[in-house]
Image (cartoon, coloured by chain):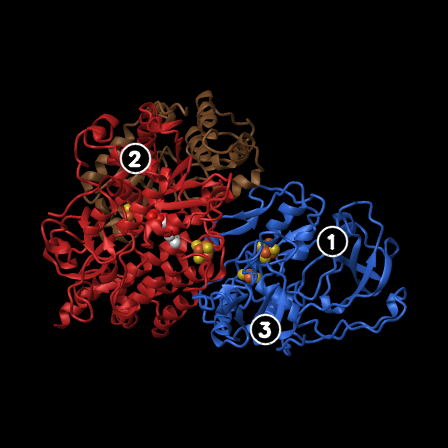
Chain colours: A brown, B red, C blue
Amino acid sequence: MESTTATVKPQFSEAAKAEIARLFEHYPAERRKSALLPILHIAQAEFGGWVSPEVQDLVAETIGILPIEVYEVSSFYTMFNLKPVGQHVLEICRTGPCMLRGSDELTAQLERLTGAKVGETSSDGLFTLKEVECLAACGTAPIVQVREKYYEQLDTPEAVDAMLAELRNLVHRPLLPWEQTGLAHSQQ
Amino acid sequence: MGRKLLTEHINVPGIDTFEVYRKHGGYRSVEKALKTMTPDEVVEEVKKSGLRGRGGAGFPTGMKWSFLAKPEGVPRHLVCNADESEPGTFKDRELMTKLPHLLIEGMITSSYALGANTSYIYIRGELLYVLRILERAIAEAYAKGYLGKNILGSGYDLDLHVHPGGGAYICGEETALLESLEGKRGNPRNKPPFPAVQGLYARPTVVNNVESIAAVVPIVNDGGDEYAKIGIGKSTGTKLISACGHLNKPGIYEIELGVPVEEFIYSDEYCGGIWKGRDLKAVVAGGSSVPILPKELILKTAAGENRLMTYESLSDGGFVTGTMLGSGGFIAMDETTCIVRNTWSFSRFYHHESCGQCSPCREGTGWLEKVLHRLEHGHGHMHDIDLLVSVAKQIEGNTICPLGEAAAWPVAAAVRHFRHEFEWHVTNPKEATRPGAYFSAKAALV
Amino acid sequence: MAKITFDGIEIEVPDGTTILNAARKIGGNIVPPAMCYYTPIKGTGGKCRACLVKVAAGSAKDPRPMPKLVPSCITTVQDGMVVENTTNQSVLDVRKGIVEMLLINHPLDCPVCDQAGECDLQNFAFEHGVATTRYEEERRTFEKIDIGPYIQLHMTRCILCYRCVYTADQLTERRVHGVLGRGDAAEIGTYIDNIIDQDFSGNVIDVCPVGALTDKTWRFKSRVWFTKPVNAHRDCGNPKCSGNVVLWYKGKDVLRVTARKDEYGEVKEWICNECRFEKKETADWTLEGPAHIDSSSVISANHYELPVVNPQVIADLPESSVRDLENNPPLKLGR
Ligand SMILES: Cc1cc2nc3c(=O)[nH]c(=O)nc-3n(C[C@H](O)[C@H](O)[C@H](O)COP(=O)(O)O)c2cc1C
Ligand code: SF4
Ligand code: SF4
Ligand code: FES
Ligand code: FES
């Protein structure tokens, strides 16, 4: 379930397969490629927070498209990590409105506290720092996203400490998205 | 207090559930439309309402709907644009998180009007947690018979799906969004053909913003004429404004179009003034893509009239002295803000988000960013300032999609209204990098 | 049929014709340049913006001008349309801007580039650009890489026209290269180590407007204007291959084999990889005679017009004259 190695061909879990089957229902049969982005999200959650070339090949095979069609897409969208990442990827918004409310200072603070620079992973493997653009939360700036969670108004040292403490204590494997909610709903 | 057509019940506990939403009058528009109106009658009400697209361009929604091609035997689609990524804009996220059923209700009523049997909500990938909220609500709507086959016994079928993006501002552009929904890179398409003729899967498609779709609910409930009574002139109804930056009370405000900008900024009903007791310096009124205006011009038009929160008033004076309502992303900057730094930040955004298909935008956005970076970090020359204007002009109007303009306008406007500040960065290279240095230098002079 | 006026010249073309192709029917200097559009490959065009023109009147029915310049390569004509290209200064100014944009990240290594003489960008810049650049920043660079035994990718030169991607999609069985990344960080690549070796993949070299995709089997690399192009054909067993090629000679040696192109640099008949990469002996071919290279190349202009002599006696043909590129660049195209 952790990161993949080049030698073992990755496989989706049964839960993921069921979720993928549900996704395919959303699009016309000859348009299965439509499910590419959602499946990449599933793959990234399932295989350690990034999509290796092998995982992307698995995605291509699952959909029935060429591997290059997956590479073209995964490299276009910023959410897909194409290199291994730490346990928690801190996505720090750097755009204007967040900058007006202190995102530069927040980034500096996170670099200091984690020992990693933007684009790097901390030596304990816990945190990867990543700068992203506006997360549609400018009213509660500055903000960091970690997986599906938004940490907002990180304009005090206490708020930042609380976030990091919470993440450090998250010892158990974070739940995969489809384990969090019973999503399947009847289409009929 | 202005009327709240969308957010009246937003803080009711449990309003994200079907039961509570229904208790507060939810899904009435679906019943009314499906049981008592023809699709064309629904379109007619939307036309009468004067509703203009809330995603940024402000195109009349009813007119857009009436352009939808209806070839025999070809399915049509309604796609909701929930990509919300325009810096300064965060209204759709709030609406979907707290009132998922409002969007779903709007999607059902609108899909019925357009004759779509499969509709999609394209939500930006970063909002996966909101996607789950929507999926849960959609499951409820299926269970209650508001989605699926033969809705409320009307014979009308609708499937509604939520589709996540993957992190790309450009996918908010409607044709890039459709490409992305087809599982491709988010490269905008050349137009024509327009989505109304060849959209998703080359089928006729309407793309509408979350707020536009939500507004269809009160329009159908109360009638287009009622809706049109709110607002001024061609700016009808209510609008969600995302207020952010240096305000005492940043947040989302549903306003009746026509509120004076000054009141919006300073009154306690809205933003409560500028933080830390400071003075206002400038405002970007409609998301990062629209021209920045200095305090004098955002509060009053060049002719000295009160600037109002309407499409027309904000654009009064064209780009020389005016701006745009855009997406309603209202970014206020206090007197200590460095305009050069802020412009550079926006430029970096567009550089980062250009899809890279067409040469003026691919190369020009990077060029703008680099020159601005140079100026902001004390390595600029005087001729760089005109270079910025010239490069912006080379991009504007010559690209496949409006991201080119979105990248060019903020730069051109910043130079137009704050040239002295750019010049100061050239003549004071050492201080230029220190945030707020320009402000303190100016303060020392007086 | 639709009648349009292009730079003051009237022409009638079938409905559905693009403005660019209508202009090509007129021919000559009024034809807009095209860096990404490629008639035989579906889906190309609309990206580089080199071909933007002014539509001064949309049609006879609706004679209003179009508000923005339009890409002539993908905009279809309407009866009564009035188009301005060389007669409109703003079009020419915008085009200058496009040249500048395309060049800011393009290396200035024409003197050593193997595409020199056949490069659409070089021609485009000579014809429409300005001599100086206002770009002070560093240019983006990439390492050259081999993608398979036949093709070399020099990404630094790429202008992201997407032609090769669509070509591989439409001509080969299994595309392995594409556009990766986005914005000005986008690049042509295979992502993982991969080789392009599908049959017909060699055609990506011919469609590439610049020297980004080149033929690795091009023997004893030589400036193109030192070579002599000769039309030839062979009975290729591959049913999809036309077998109609140009052999590029230096002395008695075939340096490379390409498909035949028209005056706009477009290949009309594709050739297979065997013909292109593996048949480098005169004996493999039936020679037809000197190729008339009518492409708009500034460098090669007037250098290919060889006297028609017995084509079998290749060695007797005079070599084209040499021009000193750096000191004496030809400035105007003589089409
Ligand atoms: C670069 C770019 C980004 C855009 N982003 C969004 C967006 O995030 N949300 C949105 O609703 N519209 C966005 N738009 C506008 C859409 O293209 C489209 O006009 C809109 O979704 C139409 O809906 P409306 O008529 O209801 O406003 C964007 C446009 C461009 C050019
Ligand atoms: S203007 Fe920019 S974002 Fe739009 S298509 Fe061109 S390169 Fe892509
Ligand atoms: S490699 Fe050549 S053909 Fe391919 S996109 Fe680049 S310039 Fe165009
Ligand atoms: S700028 Fe950071 S969330 Fe919008
Ligand atoms: S040739 Fe028309 S846009 Fe490139």
Badge 1 marks a residue whose secondary structure is: loop
Q: Chain of mark 1?
A: C
Q: Residues within 10 Å of mark 3 (few under 14, many from 20)?
A: some
Q: Residues within 10 Å of mark 1 (few under 14, many from 20)?
A: some
Looking at marks 3 and 1 on the same chain, the residue that comes earlier in the sequence is marked by 3
Q: Residues within 10 Å of mark 2 (few under 14, many from 20)?
A: few
Towards the viewer: C260 or C135: C260
Residue at (51%, 25%) from the top-left corner? A11
Q: Amino acid at mark 2?
A: Thr
Total marks placed: 3
The residue singled out by tag 2 in the image is: B36
Q: Chain of mark 3?
A: C
Q: Nearer the viewer, mark 2 or mark 1?
A: 2
The residue singled out by tag 3 in the image is: C126
Q: Nearer the viewer, mark 3 or mark 1?
A: 3
The picture quadrant where one finds residue C9 is bottom right
Horizontal arrangement in the rendering, residue A16 relative to residue C266 (left or right)? left
Q: CA distance from mark 2 to mark 1?
A: 73 Å
Residue most extreme to the top: A14
The residue singled out by tag 1 in the image is: C217
Residue C244 seen anywhere in this rendered image of the structure: yes
Q: Chain of mark 2?
A: B
**Quadrant of the snapshot with the C terminus of chain A:** top left
Q: Amino acid at mark 1?
A: Thr
Q: CA distance from mark 3 to mark 1?
A: 29 Å
